[in-house]
């Protein structure tokens, strides 16, 4: 922590115009500034998930021409992995250099000595090679085979052969996008309308559409998709596909860790903690608390802090499973570690939990696979005491938002996460609870700085607020900065942001998302004029009027505004997508939309075909059926953006490293590669003139 604070203060000095940051590694090693450290971190973190795994260390060492075994890489990670989650996060990476005097960190030694070789490695180039985690490949293959068994759309390609984990069968099975779309559909059926998946006569164009659908739908369910485009999936790049698969599988396995599915989770509250605080925790933290709850109930002195190394000796698993299933489940804790782990998994199989991890995954402390196994146990039998009448009354009295606001909050949260912003420590900003996590003002200020670099007075912002005064101070900066961006903030003060006022936070986020969307469209137009709402409507009407529909079918009439009742059938939106990409729509699936059921079917189809043509839409079918003007605006704007990007070459798979994080940072993190699509079948008509 001390080293991390030193680095943070040095970065702050640099941001304030002080001396350049220089982190001296040792007397024998070259000095390393933070920009170089950032570039190196990005090189190691091949899948862009914010943490460096042993497999990624081994891969980059090989690509740089250095001999290293899996054991070497695991040792390098273990030496600097302070929280023992099996990954090296940015803060740990920096701290390993700041505290590496005397050769304490083998990783920092190797990096400092071979810095130039690492920085010149071209990821994914023809002459380079990527290694990947064979253990995770085997486990993920088993999950896919289990969850999608009997899927008619996948047919004979299942089960996928896992082998030793070094075969490419799993990745090749993902290449046409069908498998990924089917997995995402299991997480959220509204994210992928299975009718929109191309399954026959799979030309390159149709495969690109499937992969665009999978990538944009993955974003819609909350996956962090960084530097991954349709071609990466088509080329079956293992390290990138594993990163996406893990996020989807994690969501599948942790879906029941919610108050809706398991109201007994209230038993995990600690002290004066509120239920909102508990629900804001990520699934990993809740599972850790669940395990500790049962360890305490079993009279054990053991406690865990993470689902990794703390489980390696199998003692915790043995105690947990006895508590859940009974004392007949025995594990010889005097046996070697691998035999203990094998006994734990045999016990799980005996009680009907089919584990897909191996004994070696437990012994090595693989954080991802131990999370998966722990989630399996929770899903099968959580073992929490039933609720009494007082507990049920407390749940009934919860102050929940109306459905519309809940959907808006979801949209704004997903949009914010899709920006790939980083905080002052260089960590990716991942918002789970919009109102709770935005009340400190920092994510909102990051978005504002993303929209207009330099507009946020970062030197005055409290980066680690510890009390209400700090929260209000940051809230005041949000209001002041918002006014500089011409946001309408009548009757909104810093205290409203600090108090987590839901209506007002939604109002701020709506204006920021709208401003960002309009600015992006204006920049893509390239004529120096600002896009107004009337111009977005004019674009949509002009595009739909030119839509080539089946004979005897007229295009939808023009809309008057974004709340036009004619939008409730989604026919206008489907026509808009068809005008951009005529071959994408199967008109046999489009209904008149007169009944609520037909309108919902059309809305689901409209969202999926928009994602197929490369539009990043975060709406729900209900938003379209209700013709909510805000969501209609974002839908049309996303399609227009995809329209203007069609036929343009994609960005390189690996973006240049973002600038070093500073106290006053614009947080310019790598962005997702734009959707790849085949050139349009006919020229795109000129943009409508401004009214």
Image (cartoon, rainbow, N blue to C red):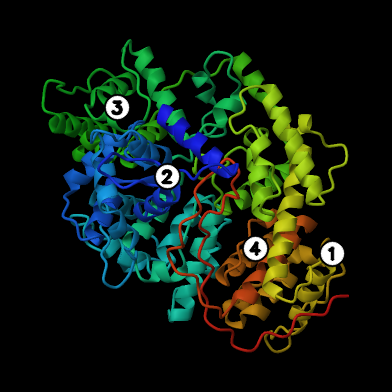
Which residue corresponds to mark 1?
A: 564
Would residue 621 appear left or right of 6 to someone viewing this image? right
- Residue 6 higher or lower than 481, as above or below: above
Closer to the eye: label 2 or 3: 3
Q: Position of residue 308 (x, y in %)?
A: 31, 33
Q: CA distance from mark 2 to mark 4?
A: 28 Å
Residue 343 in sight in this render: yes
- Compare residues 325 and 403 and report the one nearer the observer: 403
Q: Quadrant of the N terminus?
A: top left
SS under mark 4 = helix
- Count all numbered tags in the image, as a single digit: 4
Q: Quadrant of the C terminus?
A: bottom right
Q: Residues within 10 Å of mark 2 (few under 14, many from 20)?
A: many
Which residue corresponds to mark 4?
A: 601
Name the N-terminal-most of marks 3 and 1: 3
- Compare residues 574 and 12 and report the one nearer the observer: 12
- Residue 282 higher or lower than 555, as above or below: above
Q: Residue at x 71, y 49 (%)?
A: 455
Which residue corresponds to mark 3?
A: 310
Q: Residues within 10 Å of mark 1 (few under 14, many from 20)?
A: some
Q: CA distance from mark 1 to mark 2?
A: 39 Å
Name the N-terminal-most of marks 2 and 4: 2
Q: Residue at x 71, y 75 (%)?
A: 525
Toward which corner of the image does residue 493 lie, by quadrant? top right
Q: CA distance from mark 3 to mark 4?
A: 48 Å
Which residue corresponds to mark 2?
A: 250
Name the N-terminal-most of marks 2 and 3: 2
Q: Position of residue 456 (x, y in %)?
A: 69, 45
């Amino acid at each position: 922590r001390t080293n991390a604070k030193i680095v943070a203060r040095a970065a702050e000095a640099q941001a304030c115009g002080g001396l350049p940051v220089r982190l001296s590694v040792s007397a024998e090693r070259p000095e390393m500034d933070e920009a170089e450290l950032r570039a190196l971190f990005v090189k190691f973190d091949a899948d862009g998930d914010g943490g460096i795994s042993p497999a990624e260390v081994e891969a980059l060492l090989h690509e740089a021409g250095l001999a290293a075994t899996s054991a070497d890489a695991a040792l390098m990670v273990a030496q600097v992995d302070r929280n023992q989650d099996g990954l090296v996060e940015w803060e740990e990476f920096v701290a390993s250099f700041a505290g590496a005097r005397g050769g304490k960190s083998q990783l920092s030694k190797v990096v400092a000595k071979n810095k130039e070789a690492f920085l010149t490695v071209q990821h994914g180039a023809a002459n380079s090679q990527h290694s990947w985690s064979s253990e995770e490949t085997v486990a993920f293959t088993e999950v896919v085979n289990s969850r999608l068994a009997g899927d008619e759309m996948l047919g004979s390609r299942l089960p996928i052969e896992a082998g030793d984990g070094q075969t490419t069968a799993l990745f090749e099975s993902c290449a046409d996008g069908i498998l990924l779309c089917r997995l995402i559909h299991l997480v959220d059926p509204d994210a992928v309308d299975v009718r929109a998946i191309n399954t026959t006569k799979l030309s390159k164009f149709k495969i690109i559409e499937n992969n665009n659908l999978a990538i944009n739908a993955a974003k819609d369910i909350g996956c962090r998709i960084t530097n991954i485009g349709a071609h990466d999936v088509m080329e079956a790049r293992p390290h990138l596909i594993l990163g996406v698969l893990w996020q989807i599988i994690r969501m599948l396995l942790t879906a029941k860790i919610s108050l809706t599915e398991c109201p007994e989770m209230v038993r995990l509250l600690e002290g004066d903690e509120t239920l909102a605080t508990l629900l804001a925790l990520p699934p990993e933290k809740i599972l850790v608390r669940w395990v500790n709850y049962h360890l305490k109930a079993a009279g054990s002195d053991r406690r865990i802090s993470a689902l990794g190394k703390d489980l390696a000796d199998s003692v915790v698993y043995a105690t947990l499973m006895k508590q859940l299933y009974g004392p007949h489940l025995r594990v010889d804790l005097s046996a070697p570690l691998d035999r203990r782990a094998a006994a734990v998994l045999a016990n799980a199989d005996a009680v009907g939990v089919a584990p897909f991890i191996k004994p070696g995954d437990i012994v090595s402390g693989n954080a991802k696979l131990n999370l998966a196994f722990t989630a399996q146990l929770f899903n099968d039998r959580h073992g929490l005491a039933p609720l009494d009448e007082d507990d049920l009354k407390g749940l009934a009295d919860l102050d929940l938002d109306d459905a519309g606001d809940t959907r808006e909050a979801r949209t704004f949260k997903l949009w914010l996460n899709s920006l790939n912003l980083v905080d002052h420590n260089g960590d990716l900003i991942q918002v789970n609870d919009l109102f709770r996590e935005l009340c400190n003002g920092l994510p909102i200020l990051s978005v504002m700085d993303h929209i207009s670099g330099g507009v946020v007075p970062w030197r005055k912002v409290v980066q680690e607020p510890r009390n209400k005064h700090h929260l209000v101070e940051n809230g005041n900066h949000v209001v002041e900065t918002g006014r500089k961006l011409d946001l309408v903030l009548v009757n909104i003060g810093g205290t409203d942001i600090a108090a987590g006022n839901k209506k007002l936070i939604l109002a701020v986020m709506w204006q920021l998302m709208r401003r960002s969307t309009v600015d992006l469209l204006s920049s893509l137009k390239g004529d120096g004029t600002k896009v107004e709402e009337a111009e977005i409507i004019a674009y949509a009407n002009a595009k739909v009027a030119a839509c080539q529909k089946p004979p005897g079918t007229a295009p939808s009439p023009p809309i008057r505004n974004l709340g036009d009742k004619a939008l409730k059938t989604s026919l206008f939106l489907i026509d808009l997508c068809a005008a951009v990409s005529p071959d994408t729509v199967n008109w046999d699936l489009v209904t008149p939309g007169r009944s609520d059921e037909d309108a919902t079917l059309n809305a689901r189809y409209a969202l999926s075909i928009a994602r197929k043509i490369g539009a990043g839409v975060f709406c729900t079918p209900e938003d379209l059926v209700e013709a909510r003007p805000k969501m209609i605006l974002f839908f049309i704007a996303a399609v227009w953006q995809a329209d203007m990007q069609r036929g343009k070459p994609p960005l390189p798979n690996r973006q240049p490293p973002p600038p070093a994080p500073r106290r006053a940072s614009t947080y310019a993190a790598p962005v997702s590669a734009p959707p790849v699509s085949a050139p349009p079948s006919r020229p795109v008509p000129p943009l409508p003139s401004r009214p």
